[in-house]
Image (cartoon, rainbow, N blue to C red):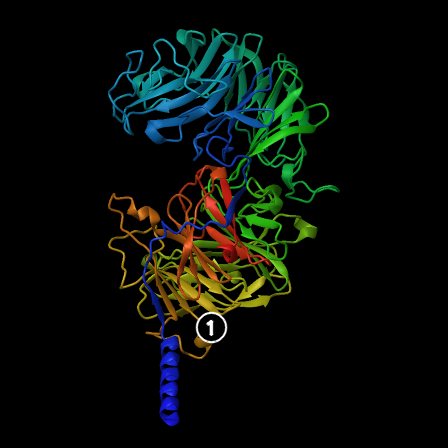
């Protein structure tokens, strides 16, 4: 009997061993009823955490009234604050429907305010939600849907509520639009306020024999008063208090008689080295203020403007945030150090207001107020770039890195904004070939902070994971500025274009022919360049497998060096590698994409896929020659996926993922939701959603590596996640042991 029991025991043991050696397969489970409880919601990078309070990611012009109420404007803010009104460091109103593109409305180039109203240049077309209904004035709410017709308008809002301020004969859905012209071929280039007059610089149309002009309206009745043609073009305008109107035309600023258009003798030639987007007239001190986005990054102040404008002073540290001295490192944020002055104006109390949009490619806005005499900052309001995530510095958990900034985090502030800006790391003047500062370059969104060989590195990628750029730091020579050392980019086999792979060899940050390690491209639609915590670089190459560039260590200049890439085949039962993650601490490779069991019914190009597979001891097996065609993964996890069919079920498709500790964190396409899976069993743990303190709001998950996580010593997890609606990064803290 004992022998039979022993045989039975051995048989069961063998069966258990055989079962445990087989790949796990986990079917998809809907997470909608499994919302986790023990987590908090905070955010990084914006002084406002939800729609009504967020600071926009761009500011291109500014206007200030006598009481220090400030209005800023940009052409597009994803969260709808194209116009923001600020006072004493607080966003007090955000004019409704001010033109992010929805419903055919597009914000213009200028805004002015008085003591009661906001006046904004805005375009309205009728091909996006338009209708043929009439407003309360019995006038059309929208123009007809016709490519040749667009209303070019001045729109009026209440200064303190942001609600539309209708008037007799006002057009638009609120009755608050004054139509200046109706031709799609024309534009409104400037807006100015003088006493009770609104001045508009209106572009003409040569094909219709319509000249450029200035039109003048009564601001009280919002009716036309008079106007005149202008020769030589029109641009931004600003009214002085001596019956003049100043206009920027390229590198020239001229002055004309406001009511007649007669050219006056005062003019200014903008210096060649100055990059200026706007200007203003200080009517209290008879000065012209010219913000300089060139290398000096300060405000030029011209006096004697009613005779011949003469540069008399500057405001702001020369070199802005990139200046280095005994008190600040290059890139370090601080008072009197501007990040990209785009506009400036003054109030009647000796204060000056500066709107900044960072000169790097990703932008990000700050509006700040100073006592001009003492140069002390009175307040600032800060927004992040349109869309980005951040990653943790694992040598110092109180610092996180977004693609162009370093943030210091105070986790005790949990539930609100938990960071303060430390520094900008992208300097277009020192490193003009930095991928993050190129005017028409890739839109950089993802951030990977790594420590390799004891040194600090930052890697970034774009929205679609088709490029990767690497940076090193040298505090002695460059302060906080990141020094380019690596650039990888998809090739194109149809064009015989290789995968670009540049690694700096001599430390000069300049790309030279002998520093390229290019390789043959097999799929130009790859979208998952990724760097692991050992510095190795990976790329899921869709149906063709995955590339691996091994990091060999640092050279004498402290720069990571790489072997030529290896291309590994996909595992059996997995067909399309769209995302990739490798954990060097466990030698575990994760691939995400589609599989024959759960294929993509159509080309849902933006979705991460339906399947995540894990291979344990991957590089060990690869070194032993075991990663060959038909190799088997250790876990196959099927996750929810739906094709786009108008049902909105695709909103819960996965967009991005990361792995940390015992969990896989999957970012879903909409609403900022994150599903959490056990990394070993594949079991669905639950779902994280934005908290009540951000009004449960989040934009879409809009790029391929939008999420990073880090396990804390107390067992909790910190999760950083893109939030592209309101220019910030969400930070969750989750305690799994308390779930």
Q: Position of residue 492 (x, y in %)?
A: 36, 57
Q: Label 1: which residue?
A: 619
Tally of marks: 1
Quadrant in the rendering for residue 97: top left
Q: Position of residue 509 (x, y in %)?
A: 58, 54
Q: Mark 1 falls on what kind of element? A: helix
Q: Residue furthest right?
A: 326
Q: Relative to residue 237, is residue 186 drawn left or right? A: left
Circle 1 Cα neighbour tier, 10 Å, few/some/many (<14 / 14–19 / ≥20): some
Q: Relative to residue 392, is residue 142 drawn left or right? A: left
Along the viewing direction, whichever of 188 and 354 lies nearer the viewer: 354
Q: Say if 177 sits above or below 75 in the image.
A: above
Q: Residue at x 60, y 19 (%)?
A: 68
Q: Residue at x 50, y 41 (%)?
A: 728
Along the viewing direction, whichever of 706 and 251 lies nearer the viewer: 706
Q: Say if 184 sits above or below 471 in the image.
A: above
Q: Which quadrant is the N terminus positioned in?
A: bottom left
Q: Position of residue 726 (x, y in %)?
A: 47, 37
Q: Residue at x 40, y 22 (%)?
A: 122
* Residue 609 in view, yes or no: yes
Q: Position of residue 440 (x, y in %)?
A: 45, 42
Q: Residue at x 33, y 28 (%)?
A: 103
* Residue 486 in view, yes or no: no
């Amino acid at each position: 009997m004992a022998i039979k029991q022993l045989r039975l025991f051995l048989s069961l043991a063998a069966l258990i061993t055989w079962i445990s050696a087989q790949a796990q397969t986990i079917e998809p489970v809907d997470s909608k009823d499994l919302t986790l409880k023990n987590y908090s919601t905070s955010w990084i990078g914006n002084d406002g955490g939800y729609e009504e309070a967020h600071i926009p990611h761009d500011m291109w012009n500014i206007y200030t009234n006598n009481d220090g109420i400030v209005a800023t404007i940009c052409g597009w803010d994803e969260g709808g604050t194209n116009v923001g009104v600020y006072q004493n460091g607080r966003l007090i109103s955000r004019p409704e429907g001010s033109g992010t593109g929805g419903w055919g409305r597009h914000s213009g180039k200028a805004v002015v305010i008085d003591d009661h109203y906001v006046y904004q240049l805005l375009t309205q077309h009728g091909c996006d939600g338009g209708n043929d209904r009439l407003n309360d004035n019995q006038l059309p709410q929208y123009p007809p849907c016709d490519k040749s017709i667009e209303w070019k308008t001045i729109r009026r809002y209440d200064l303190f509520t942001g609600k539309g301020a209708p008037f007799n004969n006002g057009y638009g859905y609120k009755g608050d639009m004054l139509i200046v012209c109706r031709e799609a071929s024309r534009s409104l280039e400037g807006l100015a306020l003088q006493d009770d007059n609104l001045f508009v610089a209106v572009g003409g149309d040569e094909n219709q024999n319509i000249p450029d002009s200035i039109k003048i309206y009564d601001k009280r009745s919002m009716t036309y008063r008079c106007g005149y043609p202008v020769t030589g073009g029109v641009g931004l305008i600003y009214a002085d208090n001596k019956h003049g109107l100043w206009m920027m035309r390229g590198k020239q600023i001229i002055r004309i008689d406001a009511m007649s258009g007669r050219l006056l003798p005062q003019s200014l030639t903008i210096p060649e080295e100055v990059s200026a987007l706007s200007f203003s007239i200080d009517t209290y001190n008879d000065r012209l203020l010219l913000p300089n986005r060139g290398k000096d990054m300060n405000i030029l102040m011209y006096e004697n403007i009613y005779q011949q404008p003469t540069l008399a002073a500057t405001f702001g540290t020369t070199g802005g945030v990139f200046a280095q001295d005994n008190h600040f490192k290059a890139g370090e944020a601080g008072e009197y150090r501007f990040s990209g002055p785009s506009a400036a104006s003054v109030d009647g109390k000796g204060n000056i207001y500066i709107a900044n949009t960072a000169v790097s490619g990703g932008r990000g806005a700050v509006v700040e107020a100073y006592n001009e005499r003492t140069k002390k900052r009175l307040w600032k309001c800060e927004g992040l770039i349109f869309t980005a995530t951040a990653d943790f510095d694992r040598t110092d958990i109180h610092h996180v890195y977004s693609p162009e900034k370093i943030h210091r985090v105070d986790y005790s502030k949990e539930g609100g904004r938990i960071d303060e800006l430390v520094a900008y790391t992208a300097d277009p003047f020192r490193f003009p070939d930095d991928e993050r500062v190129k005017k028409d370059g890739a839109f950089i969104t993802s951030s990977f902070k790594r420590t390799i060989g004891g040194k600090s590195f930052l890697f970034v990628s774009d929205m679609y994971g088709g490029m990767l750029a690497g940076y090193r730091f040298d505090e002695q020579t460059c302060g906080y500025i990141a020094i380019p050392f690596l650039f990888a980019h998809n090739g194109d086999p149809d064009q015989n274009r290789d995968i670009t792979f540049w690694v700096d060899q001599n430390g000069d940050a300049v790309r030279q022919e002998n520093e390229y390690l290019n390789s043959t491209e097999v799929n130009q639609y790859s979208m998952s360049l990724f760097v692991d915590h050992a510095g190795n670089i990976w790329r899921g190459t869709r149906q063709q497998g995955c590339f691996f560039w091994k990091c060999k260590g640092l050279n004498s200049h402290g720069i990571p060096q790489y072997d030529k890439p290896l291309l590994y085949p996909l595992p059996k039962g997995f067909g399309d590698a769209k995302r990739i993650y490798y954990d060097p601490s466990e030698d575990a490779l994760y691939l995400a994409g589609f599989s024959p069991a759960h294929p993509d019914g159509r080309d849902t190009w933006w979705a991460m896929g339906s399947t995540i597979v894990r291979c344990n001891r991957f590089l060990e097996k690869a070194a032993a020659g075991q990663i060959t065609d038909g190799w088997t993964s250790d876990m196959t996890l099927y996750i929810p996926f739906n094709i786009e069919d108008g049902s909105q079920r695709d909103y819960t498709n996965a967009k991005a993922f990361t792995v940390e500790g015992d969990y896989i964190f999957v970012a879903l396409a909409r609403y900022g939701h994150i599903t959490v899976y056990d990394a070993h069993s594949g079991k669905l743990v639950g779902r994280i959603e934005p908290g009540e303190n951000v009004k449960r709001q989040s934009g879409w998950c809009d790029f391929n590596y939008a999420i990073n996580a880090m396990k804390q010593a107390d067992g909790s997890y910190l999760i950083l996640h893109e939030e592209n609606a309101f220019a910030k990064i969400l930070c969750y803290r989750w305690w799994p042991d308390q779930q």
